[in-house]
Image: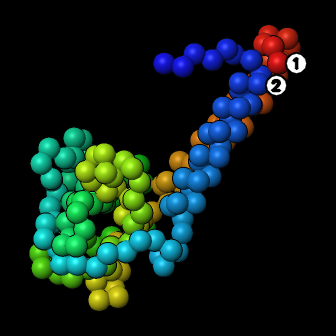
Amino acid sequence: MISLPINLRVIIAVSIAVTIMMIFYIQMNSKEKSEYKKNTGQIIYLDKQLGNLPVRNMGKYRYLKINGYEYPFEIFVGNEPGDFKPRFEQIDKLILGDTVTVYFYQTNDVIKDGINRFVQFIDKNNISYFERGNSKNAFGFVVILMCVLLLIGGIILWKMKKIEF
């Protein structure tokens, strides 16, 4: 575990690093459909569970596997109050054998976990069946706001001579 001294320089460095990561995170989740990787294939698996997944919130996820892409997709479809629901979702209207186009991005976590959780859009015959919500953008903005508040708090503590520069 990394142990950093608490001083204003460390607070500034951590705030800047986390803010840059969140800007990248927001950018990855707010592109136009045409900017994502896409894969078209027949649905070979579609269910509410995949092995031991989900580990919580049963019924709020769908697992989709299409031929031509090696990893299954995990799609959050929760629509209860408090859920960060998708903007549009009709996954349950799809059936095995349907040919769909999935728009997504892939990170090293997909390879490590063996599942892609970054589905952005799903189309069938140019008709939308899923469009991601804006929960990831909201999360990114909240984290950036927390970094700004941390930075302000650090400056106040430094001015009060509670921490060093």
The residue at which mark 1 appears reads as 159
Instruction: State the residue at coordinates (52%, 60%).
Output: 28
Q: Residue at x 22, y 41 (%)?
A: 55
Which amino acid is tagged 1? Lys
Q: Nearer the viewer, residue 80 or 135?
A: 135
Q: Which residue is mark 2?
A: 155
Circle 1: element type: helix
Q: Residue lying furthest bottom in this view? A: 125
Horizontal relation, residue 94 to residue 158: left or right: left
Q: Residue at x 28, y 79 (%)?
A: 40
Which of the 4 quarters of the picture holds residue 46? bottom left
Q: Nearer the viewer, residue 109 or 56?
A: 109
Name the colouring of the figure: rainbow
* Rendering coords of residue 73 (x, y %): 27, 60
Residue 102 point in image, percent of width and height: 33, 73
Viewer-nearest residue: 92 or 47: 47
Q: Quadrant of residue 74?
A: bottom left
